[in-house]
Every structure is written in structure tokens, then in C-alpha cells.
Image (tube, grey):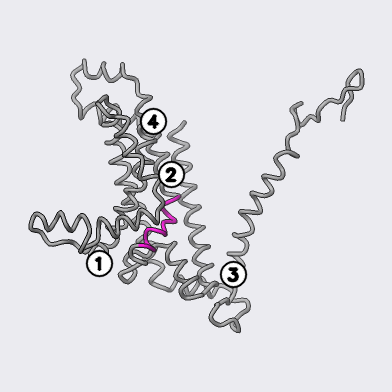
């Protein structure tokens, strides 16, 4: 440590004369690395092992047999397709409705603050609670609100989770994530220059022209952020499926996350579940890398 005149100690300096902060951030960075690396390393290790909780005598190095068995299993490709369909559908619903809601709730009208709170409130409901509400209070074919409304007009009630299982899950997850898209897009709407809108109206632009040629391009960056964040979280949707359909009927609502749960905690095949987890990690990182690059280009 350097000494100034009079015996005063000068702080340690890093490269370029700055204060060397590594000792202060090293504990948190090290803890974060351990938190990330240890579960990943254990998942990789078990994916190459014969490890079934129902038969502890079957053990040892399995090589790539867990991956080969998984890649030959049609359930994997069904789960991948369900995951893609679920993520894409929820993104379309939340982005489209979030944009429309952001435009509507950006306008002045009585009770706008209360209306905004009501739109945002589903985001603070836990996924398990939301799934139970939709399953028992709204979509129940006997006592649900939707069944009552349909019978009131002379129509037959729909067994949502029996005849439209994936659509039902998409509706529930979209209801949960719509407030998030709405918040991000509403914030972007509030940064839109009002003078630009007034100039467009003075030039004779109608509501649709203003929406498609001014508002939508202005929301492009915010939409990219919404898509990136939602996609990362939607790849791991589990609670809504577990509470409502348990992955059924058959494999109709079994996404990749629920398939891993089935292999690990229902079939007790830790090795096979770990192999599925590694595949899920690889796919998630590929998607995340693509989305991050796309968002970065939109932010430039």
C-alpha cells in the first residue's frame, strides 16, 4: 500500500489508476458461480449414470445410453412441439393484446388509474393459485362461470381441460403474462412524442395509419424485450400444467419441463431426467443467445 506525505495510506489502485474492487465483489461472484456450476455439473454427471430410485442396485456409468433412449422416445418430440406451441401462442396473445391495451390505457379517461391496477393485478397472482382459479371457478364444465354463461344462452358447456387442454393452458398462462407485456409496452408508449402524433393527424393520418406507421415502429424495441424475457420464463412453465391437466390427456399438454418432472419424480429415472434436463439447457441457451442478439440489434 502506498504512503502519502504525513503517513496517510492511499487506497489500492487497479489498472488505469482506479480503485481495485475485486476483493469486494469476489465473494458474491464466487457464490453465484457455485450456485450455477454445482447444479449444472451434477445434472451432467447424473445424465451419464444409470440411476433409478426404484432399483438402487442398477448403477454405474451409462455413457450416452440415456441420451440415445431419450432421442428415440417419441414423447420427447411431442414435448418439444408442445413447448414451442405454448411459447409461441402465449407470445402472440400477450404482445398483441399488450400493445392494444397499452394504446387504450395511455389515453385519458375517468378511472384510468384503477383500470391500470386491475389489468396489472394478475401478474401478482402465484401460478398455482391462478391455475386453481381458472380450473375450479372459471373453466369447470359443471360449476364454472364459463359453463354457466354458455348454458344461460342455450349452449352446451365446454369441457376445457378434456377437449381443449393445450388451449386452456395457453389461456391461463397468457392471462398471467399479459400484465407484464402491458407494463413494458405502456412505459414505451408514454415516451412517444405527442407532437409527432399531432403532426400525423394534421397531415390527415387516420387511427389505423397512426397505429401501424408510428406506434408499432416506436414499440419495436419494447416488444423485443418482452419477447426475450417472456420466452426465457415460458420455456419452464410447470405449475399451470401440473395443477390443471398433469400433462394430459395423454401427452397433450406435456412440455419439456413437465417431461423432466415425469422422468424424475414419477418414473424415478434420475439419469434419464438429467439427460432431458441437459437437452433443455442446451435448447434454452440457443434460444436465449438468438433473442439477446436480436434485442441488441434493435437497441443499436
**Secondary structure under badge 2?**
helix
Of callouts 2 and 1, which one flags the residue occurring earlier in the amino acid sequence? 1
Instruction: Kindly identify which residue carries mark 4.
Output: 187
Of callouts 4 and 2, which one flags the residue occurring earlier in the amino acid sequence? 4
Image quadrant where residue 299 sits: top left
Contact? badges 2 and 1 (CB < 8 Å): no
**Secondary structure under badge 3?**
helix
Instruction: Kindly identify which residue carries mark 1.
Output: 162
The crowding category of the residue bearing disc 3, from other C-alpha atoms within 10 Å (few below 14, some 14 to 19, many at least 20), is many
Farthest-out residue, right: 6
- Residue 240 magenta: yes
Q: Give x and y (percent) for residue 58.
A: 59, 82
The crowding category of the residue bearing disc 1, from other C-alpha atoms within 10 Å (few below 14, some 14 to 19, many at least 20), is few
Q: What is the quadrant of the N terminus in the image?
A: top right
Q: For the point 20% across and 55% down, which residue is it?
A: 146
Q: Nearer the viewer, residue 163 or 142?
A: 142
Real-space Cα distance between discs 4 and 3?
Answer: 45 Å
The crowding category of the residue bearing disc 2, from other C-alpha atoms within 10 Å (few below 14, some 14 to 19, many at least 20), is many
Nearer the observer: mark 3 or 1; the answer is 1
Contact? badges 4 and 3 (CB < 8 Å): no
What's the magenta region?
A: 233-243
**Secondary structure under badge 1?**
helix
Instruction: Kindly identify which residue carries mark 3.
Output: 46
What is the number of the mark on residue 228?
2
Nearer the observer: mark 2 or 1; the answer is 1
- Residue 5 as seen in the image, left or right of residue 129: right
Q: Nearer the viewer, residue 163 or 274?
A: 163
Amino acid at each position: 500500500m502506498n504512503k502519502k506525505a504525513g503517513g496517510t495510506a492511499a487506497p489500492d489502485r487497479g489498472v488505469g489508476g482506479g480503485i481495485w474492487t475485486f476483493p469486494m465483489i469476489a465473494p458474491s461472484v464466487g457464490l453465484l458461480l457455485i450456485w450455477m456450476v454445482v447444479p449444472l455439473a451434477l445434472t451432467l454427471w447424473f445424465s451419464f449414470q444409470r440411476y433409478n430410485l426404484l432399483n438402487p442396485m442398477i448403477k454405474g456409468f451409462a455413457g450416452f445410453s440415456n441420451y440415445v433412449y431419450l432421442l428415440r422416445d417419441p414423447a420427447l418430440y411431442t414435448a418439444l412441439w408442445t413447448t414451442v406451441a405454448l411459447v409461441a401462442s402465449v407470445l402472440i396473445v400477450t404482445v398483441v393484446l399488450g400493445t392494444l391495451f397499452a394504446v387504450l390505457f395511455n389515453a385519458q379517461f375517468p378511472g384510468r388509474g384503477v383500470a391500470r391496477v386491475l389489468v396489472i393485478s394478475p401478474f401478482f397472482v402465484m401460478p398455482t393459485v391462478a391455475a386453481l382459479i381458472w380450473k375450479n371457478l372459471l373453466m369447470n364444465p359443471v360449476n364454472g362461470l364459463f359453463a354457466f354463461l354458455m348454458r344461460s344462452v342455450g349452449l352446451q358447456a365446454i369441457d376445457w381441460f378434456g377437449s381443449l387442454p393445450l388451449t386452456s393452458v395457453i389461456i391461463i398462462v397468457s392471462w398471467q403474462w399479459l400484465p407484464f407485456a402491458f407494463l413494458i409496452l405502456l412505459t414505451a408508449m408514454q415516451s412517444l412524442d405527442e407532437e409527432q402524433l399531432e403532426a400525423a393527424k394534421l397531415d390527415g393520418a387516420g387511427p389505423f395509419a397512426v397505429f401501424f406507421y408510428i406506434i408499432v415502429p416506436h414499440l419495436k424495441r419494447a416488444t423485443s424485450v418482452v419477447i426475450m424475457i417472456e420466452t426465457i420464463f415460458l420455456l419452464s412453465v410447470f405449475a399451470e400444467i401440473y395443477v390443471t391437466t398433469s400433462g394430459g390427456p395423454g401427452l397433450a399438454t406435456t412440455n419439456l419441463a413437465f417431461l423432466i418432472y415425469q422422468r424424475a419424480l414419477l418414473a424415478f429415472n434420475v439419469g434419464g431426467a438429467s439427460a432431458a434436463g441437459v437437452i433443455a439447457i442446451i435448447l434454452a441457451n440457443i434460444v436465449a443467445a438468438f433473442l439477446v442478439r436480436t434485442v441488441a440489434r434493435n437497441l443499436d
